[in-house]
Image (cartoon, rainbow, N blue to C red):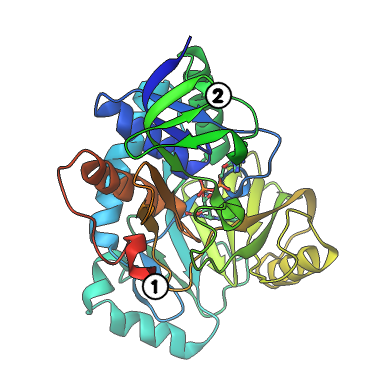
Amino acid sequence: MTKEVDYIIVGQGIAGTVLAFTLMKAGRQVLLIDDPGLSSASKVAAGLYNPVVFKRLTKSWMADELIPFLDTFYTELEKTLNCKFHFKKRIVKLFAEEQEREFWMKKTAAEVGRYLDKTIDDHFLPGLVNSPLGAAEVHHSGNIDTRVLLKAAADHFRSSGCLLEEKFETGQLVISEDHVSYKDCRAKKIIFCEGFRAAENPYFGWLPFRLTKGEILTIQLQDDQEIPFEKVINKGVFILPLGNNSYRVGATHTWDKLNDDATAEGRSELTEKLEKVIRVPFVITEHLAGVRPAVNDRRPMLGLHPEHPALGVFNGMGTKGIMLAPYFADHFVGFLEGRNALDKEVDIRRFV
Ligand SMILES: Cc1cc2nc3c(=O)[nH]c(=O)nc-3n(C[C@H](O)[C@H](O)[C@H](O)COP(=O)(O)OP(=O)(O)OC[C@H]3O[C@@H](n4cnc5c(N)ncnc54)[C@H](O)[C@@H]3O)c2cc1C
């Protein structure tokens, strides 16, 4: 017997998960297809969101809209899934040069200033970290524990009978003008949220991905003192407290050997940077890698296939899936349901 749904979503990373919940909230029936044996950027991500671009001390693209949106979205999702994965945490920037400190103070008066604390701390955890030039904090930042979210979401989808845990085979897809069929399921549309694997998708492989590999460590500090749980440290690397003196440290950015192999080079790069920040011994307890679905113009990619309107894509989250996914899932669902047009800056038609 044929199962009928409104949308099939391929991929249950952060993009597919957030899109599925947004569609369900709009009253649509969804079938998710995800192969849990495949690697996923979302499962290794630190899950940080930061309204500030540290390199130039500017506001991150659309931060004023994205941050309040994600706050409401993830808070509601925590209630739906009955678990905690959203943590508001200030990011503490340790200054590496005197000019950086002066630049920060100057920028507190600029547009980005609403996210920058005006107080400089000259004694930030002196026994634990190296911060001879002081430190200052970013407001409205935080992190999502993606592993907790994705697992709780998978359990929820499974128990609702809307998760198919297997590899999606493009050869089994039958496309019509106003619907698709996949095995025994028929849907109005299929939306691909395959992360970096979209680059191999026969219908969307033409999109200009600029995939970036990232490596990340989990460490345990060998010291009684802890970095406060509600702060993330940044100086060349980020150090995200997980509790019980365990921390996630990342991340590298490389553009070749795009796979999920954790490498000796990645480990040394992160260890060397970390040793410049942390004054106490640590042990590495985990080392992971993933591939970010980044795009040439650093904007998400959403929309429908130019020749097959029953096929859609929600991808290109790059380094900022946590911030981008909730707002743009809502925007995309508005478009799919005929409520709004797609913003040209994120519409895949910008590449046609
Ligand atoms: C080391 C590292 C650190 C990061 N840190 C952060 C951070 O702090 N903050 C932040 O916002 N972002 C961070 N990112 C980026 C973030 O991970 C991505 O923006 C986001 O995860 C992309 O999500 P996605 O759902 O598009 O792709 P993915 O997470 O890769 O999910 C794709 C899903 O599709 C499934 N899939 C693909 N093809 C098929 C198929 N044929 N059949 C079935 N299933 C399929 C896969 O199994 C997977 O579950 C980091 C990335 C890395 C690598």
Q: Residue at x 64, y 49 (%)?
A: 247
Is 323 located above or below residue 126 in the figure? above
Dot 2 amino acid type: Lys
Q: Residue at x 24, y 66 (%)?
A: 114
Q: Is residue 195 left or right of residue 112?
A: right
> Is label 2 in a helix, a strand or a loop?
loop
x, y (%) of residue 103? 37, 86
Residue 127 shows up from this direction: no
> Is label 1 in a helix, a strand or a loop?
loop
x, y (%) of residue 283? 80, 52
Residue nearest the observer in this picture, 85 or 32: 32
Q: Residue at x 57, y 73 (%)?
A: 131
Toward which corner of the image does residue 37 lie, by quadrant?
top right
Identify residue for label 1. 120
Q: Residue at x 17, y 42 (%)?
A: 338
| Within-10-Å neighbours for mark 2: few <14, some 14–19, many 20+ | few
